[in-house]
Amino acid sequence: MENKEKQLVIVSSVTYAMKGKQLLGKYGIRAEVIKTPRNTAEKSCTYSLLVYKDIDRAEKILTDNGIKVLGRAQRRGGV
């Protein structure tokens, strides 16, 4: 089910985003660290993980490993 929409998992810092990317990679979930788009986040200094599949599983893995998820958003089109 290929989709042009990618899911963003919003976290509080670049440090958590980097840790999250590495952690998700260990579970076979591809993710990229990006600065959260301004129109997406309530707080301006957040980072996101751009997740390509298994968004529910990715969020559970992050929270189970102590990475606080601030929210989710969708990103349309290419990276």
Image (cartoon, rainbow, N blue to C red):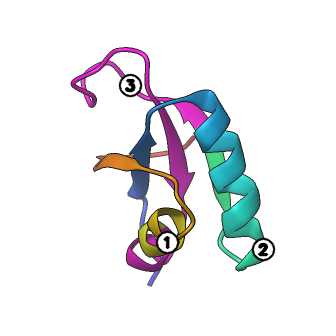
Q: Is residue 7 magenta?
A: no
Q: Earlier in the sequence, mark 3 or mark 2?
A: 2
Residue 7 pos. (x, y %): 40, 56
User: What element does badge 2 sit on?
Assistant: helix
Residue 67 position (above or below residue 43): below
Q: Amino acid at mark 2?
A: Lys
Picture residue at 45% right of the left edge, 33% below the top: 12
User: Which residue does the numbered mark 1 point to in the structure image?
Assistant: 64
Q: Is tag 1's residue or tag 2's residue first in the polypeptide sequence?
A: 2
Asked if labels 2 and 1 touch by Cβ distance under 8 angstroms, the answer is no
Q: Picture coordinates of residue 54 (x, y %)?
A: 48, 78
Residue 56 is situated, as x and y percent measured from the top left of the image, at 38, 75
The alpha-carbon separation of the residues under discs 1 and 3 comes to 25 Å
Depth order, front residue of 60/3: 60
Residue 8 disc label: none
* Up-down relation of residue 54 to residue 16 (above or below): below
Dot 3 lies on which element? loop
Q: Which residues are magenta?
A: 34-58
Amino acid type of the residue tagged 1 in the rendering = Asp
Spatial CA span between label 3 and label 2 = 26 Å
Residue position marked by numbered label 2 in the rendering: 26
User: Residue under circle 3?
Assistant: 37
